[in-house]
Amino acid sequence: MFLEKESLGVLRDALEQLNEGFKDLPVYNPPVDTEALGKILSDVAKRMQDNYPYFHPMYCGQMLKPPHPIARLAYALALWINPNNHALDGGRASSAMEKKAVAEIAKMFGWDIHLGHLCSGGTMANLEALWVSGRLSPGKKVVASDQAHYTHERICRVLGLPFDFVPCESRGRMDPDALRVLLDKGDIGTVVVTMGTTATGSVDPLLEILKLRPRHDFRIHADAAYGGFFKLVENLDQETLSAFECIHEVDSIVVDPHKHGLQPYGCGCVLFKDPAVGQFYKHDSPYTYFSSKDLHLGEISLECSRPGASAVALWATQRLLPLVPNGTFAGDLAKSRNAAKKLFEMIQNDPRFMPVMAPELDILVWVPKAESAGRISSLSQAIFVEAAARNLHLAVANLPASLFIEGWKDVTWDQENVACLRSCLMKPEHLDWIERIWEVLDKTTDRVLKIGQ
């Protein structure tokens, strides 16, 4: 069995309990044509087979991690009500769950006092954070590393904010010296610090960047969409640990529960250290916020209708797997980190490969050894295709030569970028499957190199 089904009985029991809560209503049995539903769902199932096996440990390509069973069940259960967390009238229970779940995430980062809510994803969460930054520092520039997520530049164009890139050093982290040169110009209002880049999993040196703030007076926004939950993990290298240890000193944080938080898609989170920024969200909706004097989540978010089911699923998951150091949730993240370290050691000790950089989180990037960037790229693409044919699903990342020129002295740079093999070892099960993954990678590489001779 590949797709878990045993929990469906738990969902049926929970539905019966949910139904009991409305037993005082007049009887109403909504019509359902189960035969028609069955035919269409059968077609859906057949069509959905046209997918990579994202749920399986042999899939370690893109950032795709299956929701935890409790998240799937709680989300589905909530859909029978389909609450809307914009206003309390549309989602009383789910709004309370959202506030509780978000407060637990804020506490993980060391904030007891905060303003925050769930969003449709990391892009919207980052947009809200940079929108607030623009209101607090009008006309001033936003900067992010040249390995930061591409949405920051796009968001700034949407918001009409000036934007610039900060060069990275060879580990894919923002270069503090390069940032200092830009800060000396005096026109920077916000520095985006990436806590886990999506290409290489690199964590910007937050501690060094914080040291620049007293002199230059800028806001710091931590884009922890991918790496945020690693705040709970202790088996990181010292520089990475130091960055997470001081994350409470930033002004705003974004984290995506739909990545390492075990949630379905459509669940991002934005947090602000200063609750006073809620003033920028103030608006009037005379028919929406009338039933309660309590804060409606729509009063502190740019989005209007938002799925209460996302909040229900997140609350239930954090109830089962609390966000605490040394807990089950943190332990599973540590396994993913160990899987990346183990695969890195195997690649590092194999003369056919060149590691790009040691993994900071659970993302690993490497290349087959060759004489030129062009040859490396073609071999990477060939290994990617051949591995997929053997049910090992990797990814390919095109990265700039600037990250490698210092370390790859014997490589001829006949192109500006190089295609690298990339794996996201996001599932804790990856640790137990590393030997199997390596076995397939080993045979795949042998075949590709033999054909390419």
Image (cartoon, rainbow, N blue to C red):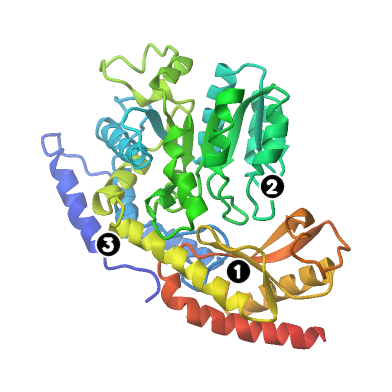
User: Which of marks 1 and 3 precedes in the sequence?
Assistant: 3
Say if 193 sits above or below 53 in the image: above
Say if 20 sits above or below 371 in the image: above
Disc 1 from disc 2: Cα separation: 25 Å
Amino acid marked by disc 3: Leu
Q: Residues within 10 Å of mark 3 (few under 14, many from 20)?
A: few
Nearer to us: label 3 or label 1: 1
Seen from the viewer's position, the closer of residues 195 and 178 is: 178
Which structural element holds mark 1? loop
Disc 3 from disc 2: Cα separation: 48 Å
For the point 38% across and 40% down, the residue is 109
Mark identifier at residue 443: none
**In which quadrant is the C terminus drawn?**
bottom right
User: Which of marks 2 and 1 precedes in the sequence?
Assistant: 2
User: Which of marks 2 and 3 precedes in the sequence?
Assistant: 3
Mark identifier at residue 8: 3
Amino acid marked by disc 1: Leu
The image position of residue 31, as x and y in percent, is 29, 47
Mark identifier at residue 168: 2
The image position of residue 158, as x and y in percent, is 66, 28
Circle 1/circle 2 CB separation < 8 Å: no
Residue lying furthest left in this view?
Answer: 24
Residue for badge 1 = 394
